[in-house]
Image: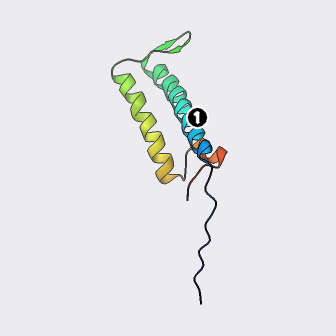
Amino acid sequence: MEATTETKPQPATWRIVLAAIFDFFTAFWVFGILVATIFGGKTESGFNLTGGSALLLFALIVAYFVIFNKYLGGTIWKRIFRARRS
């Protein structure tokens, strides 16, 4: 008896790259506005973070990618573009 392994087709590279770009910008704006609202830093054109609040923003962005990819099966845009690799 022969063991057959079925391979799922992998998503196109452009989908993976586009999902990563959209994920970064989405996380940057959502967490940026959130941190700026809590710690003060909102401006008329968005937000301006420096020092500890800027470090917190980047830590939240990294946590977003780690948590979503490791524990939730993929980030928001990876799911939308169906860009998850098996």
Query: 32 or 69, which lies in front?
Result: 69
Task: State which quadrant residue 86 falls in.
Answer: bottom right
Eyeballing the image, is 36 above or below 69? above
The x, y position of residue 31, in whole percent, is 50, 29
Q: How many marks?
A: 1
The residue that appears at 41% across and 30% down in the rendered structure is: 58
Query: 39 or 47, which lies in front?
Result: 47
Eyeballing the image, is 59 above or below 78? above
Eyeballing the image, is 43 above or below 54? above
Which secondary structure, mark 1?
helix
The residue that appears at 63% across and 63% down in the rendered structure is: 8
Query: Badge 1, how many Cα within 10 Å: few under 14, some, many 20+?
Result: some
> What amino acid is found at the position of numbered circle 1 in the picture?
Phe
The x, y position of residue 59, in whole percent, is 39, 34
Quadrant where the N terminus lies? bottom right
The residue that appears at 55% across and 34% down in the rendered structure is: 21
Residue at numbered disc 1: 22
The residue that appears at 50% across and 26% down in the rendered structure is: 34
The x, y position of residue 14, in whole percent, is 61, 42
The x, y position of residue 41, in whole percent, is 45, 15
Q: Residue pushed farthest top?
A: 44
Task: State which quadrant residue 10 falls in.
Answer: bottom right
- Say left or right for 51 vs 12: left
